[in-house]
Amino acid sequence: MGCGPSQDIGSNGNAPTDRGGKKAANDRKQRIHVEERENPSAYHNTEDVHALVTEILQGNVEIKCPPNAKIVRIFTSSTFTDTEHERNALMERVYPKLKKFCQERGFEFQVVDMRWGIRDEATDDHMGTELCLREIEACQKLSSGPNFVTFLSERYGTRLLPRKIDADEFESIMSHVTSEDGKELLDSWYKKDENEIPSVYVLQKISTNLPEYKSDSDETKGQAKNTWWSVSEKLRRFLSQAAESVFRSDSRANKYKYSVTEHELNKGIVEVGNPDKNCFWFHRILTDVDAQEAEDRRLLDRFVESGDSEDDAKGLLDSLKTEKIVVKLPKDSILTYNVNWTEKGIDPKHVSEHKEYINQLCQDFEEKMKERISEGIAGRIHSEITDPLYEEVAQHAAFCQDKCESFQGRDNVLKPIENYLKSNKNNTLVLHGMSGSGKTSVVAMAAKMARRLISKDAVVILRFLGTTPDSCNIRRLLYSVCRQLSKAYGDDEDTPDALKMLIRTLPERLKKATKERPLVLLLDSLDQFDAEGDARKLSWLPLELPEHVKLIVSTLPDKEYECFPILQSLLDNEQFLAIPKLETSDSETILQSWLKMQNRRLTSDQMNALVQACQQCPLPLFLKISFDEACRWSSYSKPEESQLKTTVRDVIINLFERVEMHYGDMLVSRALGYVTAGKNGLTENELEDILSIDDDVLNDVYQYWTPPIRRLPPLLWVRIRAELSSYLVDRGADGVRVVSWYHRQFKEAAQQRYLPDQKTRQLIHANIADFFMGKWADGKKKPYISKQGVKGESDRLVASQPLVFGEDSYNLRKLSELPYHLMQSEQLQSLKDNVFLYLDWLYTKMKAMSLRHVFDDFRAASAKYPDDTDIRLVSEVLQLSQEALLIDPNQLAPQILARVVQTKKLQALVSQAQNPKFTCLLPSFPFLTPPGGPLLRVVTGHRDNMMGLDISCDGKLAITAGADSSVKLWDVESGYELKSLEDVGLEVNNLKFCNGDKHFAVSFKGAINIYQSSNGSQVARLCPDGESSTASVPFAVGGECSEKLFVPCQGVLKMIDLKSETTVKEVTDDFLDERYWSCYIQAKGYVVAYYNTLLGRKMNLLQVVDMSAESPAVRTIEPYPKTKTPGGVFQTHPINALVITDDRIIVSNMVENGLKIYDIKTLELLKFIEGSKRDMSARFYLTQDMRFITFPNKGRVCVWDLNTETRSNILEHPFPIYNTATIDGHNIVTIGIDNLMRIWDRRRDDPDARLPRRDWQSHKAPKTASDDDDEKERELFADLWQIPGDQRHIVAYSKQRTGDDCAVTVWDTATCKPISRTSVKSPDGLRWSILDKNHAIGVVGQRIKIIDFVTGKITKVFHGKTGGEWASLVKNRTEIVAVTQGGRNLKIMDVASGKPLAILRHGTTESRHSSPVAYFNCDSEDNGRNVCSILEDDLLTWYIWDVNTRSLKCTLKAPGTPDKSSMVIRESTFSSNCTYFCCKYKENKDINTDVAVWNTLSGQLTHRLKHEKQGSVSSIVPMGDDKLLVSYCEKATDIVLWNLSNGERLERLPGHSFRHVDKLLLTSDYRSLLSYQSFSAKEREFIIWDMETRAKVAGFTVEENSVIQLAQDGNVVVVGANSIGSIVSFTLHGDDVTKFEMPKNDSSIYQAAGKEIVLELVDPDNDEKDDPDDMDSDFDSDED
């Protein structure tokens, strides 16, 4: 047997069909309008496609769009009986591989095999051939790459009767039927339908004349089946013979003799213009069939067409092969297999040659398909139709065309829209009407009319919300609309991704409209938005439109969808157009028009029934469904078959019942149940797979026949889909095409019918969840029990469901659907195991989608399972880590390990986090705020400092203001940003909820803006001090229901009514004559109090006025009278804090920090409650019940309990906080200088949520952080020093925030345990250089000393004194360089003896240079060979010294003049080989600093390294081979690598997310870089960079800035964690990282240490003494 492919059947010599050659560019557009409208797949020329895409993006909704689905869809054509082994082998062995191959490239693979699994019932309506041809057409339209494969071999195939025959043709044929039996038979099976125009004869269903055909009895059904085959063969022969007589050589006779296979091949290959890339023939030839004996004929006939049949099947087969297929297909598309016949036919199970043939076929099929699929995908990639924007616009255009195609009448609605479009109005038009009223069709027609009415060049942007995933979500909608606006107007500017930026961008993009190219934006069904971003509150909707812009929106009027009431509150009545129910006359006109379009008519009785039904439910949706049902009526239908229901729901249910009756209740109910239950719909592949693992369905389908593979036959769903084609639509979701209901009414009806109860819903969702979990994929056999009770198991060949296909093609379908279905099916444990406690899931979803999508899953789960601890804790970990995860999802595992204290609660997740697949830096133990404590979530948003904060009375909403002129509205419970208002005004300084929380007020320079709390839209602008005022506007909120604003203005206090937006009362007060804009004001009801800390002598006065009085009078309190100092000077202490209760006024200040409480009526001082001197009393916030006062107190929240008259400091923050807000004193919101909003519940006090202290003391007596007194200041890490020659240990220098207490601790970086500790008293801190494992050199006063920091002893005091603050080690740490005693020169000293070796004089002995040394530095921290120095009186000249020769090497002069130029002398360095010297520099009028580079050999300035974006230098670090790393700040925050030899930029590292970095640490081999910011609260990520690839390796975001160092040869990052008093070691982990193993045994000298030692650095008896033999003392003293 020859198993390999051969080309022994001819070849194709035809050239590809020419479509008419190239045309001129100006013809192309017209051709698109005309030809492309009919054949959207016709154009593949790049210029044609570009022109087409341009037209579509500009809003031409009449063009048929080229298909853009990412699908490879192949129709396989074969004869039925003879290719079963081939088709089954491909299904089992090849199709799963091709599915995976396509998935990895972001495509879906579909195979349409209409032969496999056909039940007898499927042939009842004779739709088989029509469905096959329809599916071929769909494959040709949708598939990228191959679309048709035939296995035509030795069988011609089944020939079926035509289902419809033109009446004239049928009657002509009947006239040539000579047999009376034939005429009678044809008359009984073909009935004339005069409802079709022209009339046709319709082949009746088999069960119509043979009802036993659908019998439950196998025997009865078998008899009916045999009867039908006999009858059908007679019918076909009668028709074929008569047609031959009528048409003779006319091709019309072919349909009576062609097999289904030939019809398929004609459609799939022969009639295709250029099939060579898309079609294949796998041709099997049986080589010795002619020699078979007669007794084998029956088996042989299953495989080979005999040559003696009456209708010449063999001749037709030969003609099909040689005259059609071979002529059309090229050689490489025909693969031939010569196969020997056996007594059992094709038998791969027992015949090795046949097995080899099947193997070869599978191999060839896989290779060919992969090759052509790859070519097809590559072709798409180079085409513009792969742009997601085009895909989105094309879907809406196609939907529009579908709606317009059947649109009729409704002039009463279209006319007002036409008037609006033609008018000069720049406002929004709102269409509203009940569900099913036809709003969507009206919007479609408006889009179609727009260009005709306004301008042929008008840009029309159209979105039917809810029909695509990108139109369900406000962020994605605005993104696509903004991008289309940019493309349509010829720009290609960047479009932001963040919602807040998109809301700002949309109005700007609308301004692109011009008179010549006006814009129409249409948004249908605002009520279809999902919940994200509170889209239905419409805060994103532009209320003011630019010139030449029209905006049409539609919505349901129901309040539950929010949109309509909000639009009513924002727009005038004239902007609304109601979509009414249909008039009877309209209904009849529309129906007649539709019938004409469908080439149909109805009998008078049928028409009356249809019209009467529509009169009872005059909605377009009902009309459409009823019309579709009426189109099924034939003229011979019985009256009872022509009845209609009278409501939309009933007519839909009636439709469902009919489909169930036809295709089986179980199959239909499950199929439609799955479609309905899908979160975003299901793809056809997904649905087929899910049905294939549903054994209830398979048992029902297999009731009378069991196929070789336990899967759902594809034809069954194809038939159901065809039956419901008008009501099921393909929409895009997660990058694929999904099947879903086209109208909300259908989904609701399907939910009622197919998901009626909890049990059914759980079952349906559980099966979908099993599919997306891949429970039965990848060869796993699913057990089953057949309907006959037989047990078995089988591979269902369902698609694999990894999280990622290949390297970077995410399984978005699984990520989107699985959590939803696990929740709906009540599979809590599976939900946790596969989603919420599965690290790879969380990580992948963040990467593939967003952190917000992950939070949405948790939010839904928390609502369903509020008491589940695991879900709550993981959710809180993510909430607390939000800032870090937004920066970098790779921080997921590190953040989990840094926060989860009690690992038993989340053991599985913690275990996964310890072994992540993705690259990240893992900490040694927790040190960040853990879940379960009082901190619930951390939210980031503002770009600059957060300044203002308030919360609503119910605690659900918060508003914040930033120094970036932004205001944000937040959902407190979820932490979601609901609205961002940008560029509100300069210096936003106050904001408050008002008017019963319906609004909030924001003040800034010159005005107060009032916004709706529901959607953030501005409703008013108040200028209390006049339009021209630019002063800040303080205000307070009061009145009966916070409906009044009290505003200090120039010399007057005004009360403004928010409803009327007018000043209703004012009172004069000369206190407000000066600096009124800096007042702090509070109100309760109508009592108002205010003070001003900027009024000098008046800053201790409190003004009080009751604005409810008819003639309000201002009264004054002096809470803090002036006091006289011992020196006789009067002091005035200001008021710093104020609140008002129902009956009291409470004030405080930062001096006493107590509470002074006054009676609100008499202003009598009632009492004084003493506070703490350490408090910072300001910005008081009073709870709703007036019991608690909170205020920011450095890094904590201070809470006064007015009932108990006690205060407490709670809720420690890593940084100082700016403001607090609370409704009850328990749920507290804070904002801090780190630009974060924190949401707390101080009642939560889980002991497991406390970080254990790991400092020196805790290792002796372990305790948690909460055990400490809240007033106690902890020791803070000040620096980490590497130990020369010891990579395992590190020295930490720590100190108290205040006081002189310092400590030096040696830490083991492998165990993160302290080994030795030395306490030191040092008012000036410690300036040490580590000499060796236990010694350091430091300057104490004017003495240089060597300290043994393990034993706590001074081991050496150097000769003489130093006039500097530090000493630097040089020459392998054998010498030091320091400033001489007089401070004017440098001296080199010997470490061993402590004696000076040389003086490096800046002037000659005669000149005796008198200026002190301002700064000096060495080229290496411990092995310097060169020293630079600079003097205070000349900060533009560097002195470069050679340590070895003790001589001046050169002087380097900076350009510019001293009064206008400057060098940042502490940012200076030598290159690695000391050839170059670099310094941060700014010359004359330069705004930004750059790097000045000198050649130390020539002394010449060689380069100025300037950032092209005007960034200023932050820090500089040398690399090997004369390279320099520079980090930048201000206008640029990246890190740049420069070549010092030529001054060219080599590489740019992108830098950090929020602020510049000021610390750059390189490993000794220069392969890795550590960058971080040491002081900015806003930038807390440290990053490891690979300096070979210049790529970010990993990063980690801490909660507070700290000192960081490298250890273990750069394999370990050590962080000083102040939260636990310990170092934390970070190491790289991940599949792509060689894991660093920490050393286990410690044999160092530190093992003997154990007790804390107190070190006295200062020797008062000897440190002040001079050394008479000090070689520099006499010289310097003479200078003095």
Image: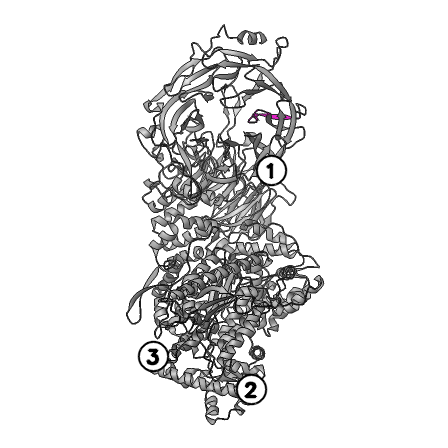
Frontmost residue, 567 versus 1188: 567
Residue 217 percent location from the top left of the image: 32, 80
Q: Is residue 1140 visible?
A: no
How crowded is the residue under tag 2: few (<14 C-alpha within 10 Å), some, or many (20+)?
some
In 3D space, how far apart are the residues under numbered discs 3 and 1 (Cα atoms)? 81 Å
Mark 1: amino acid: Lys
Q: Residue at x 31, y 28 (%)?
A: 1260
Q: Position of residue 181 (x, y in %)?
A: 45, 92
User: Helix or strand or loop: what does disc 2 sit on?
Assistant: helix
Q: Name the residue under label 1.
A: 1531
Residue 1465 part of the magenta-drawn span:
yes
- Measure the C-alpha gap from mark 2 to mark 3: 38 Å
Q: Quarter holding the C terminus? A: top right
The residue singled out by tag 3 in the image is 216
Amino acid carrying label 2: it is: Glu
- Closer to the camera in the image, 123 or 431: 123
Q: How many numbered discs, if any?
A: 3
Residue 438 location in percent, x, y?
54, 70
Q: Based on the picture, tell me whether residue 1511 belongs to the magenta stretch.
A: no
Q: Nearer the viewer, mark 3 or mark 1?
A: 3
Q: Name the residue under label 2.
A: 169
Q: Is 469 located above or below residue 1563 in the figure?
A: below
* Mark 1 vs 2, N-terminal side: 2
Q: In which quarter of the image is the N terminus?
A: bottom left
Range of magenta residues? 1460-1475
Q: Circle 1: is it few (<14), some (14-19), or many (20+) Cα within 10 Å? A: some
Residue 397 visible in the picture: yes
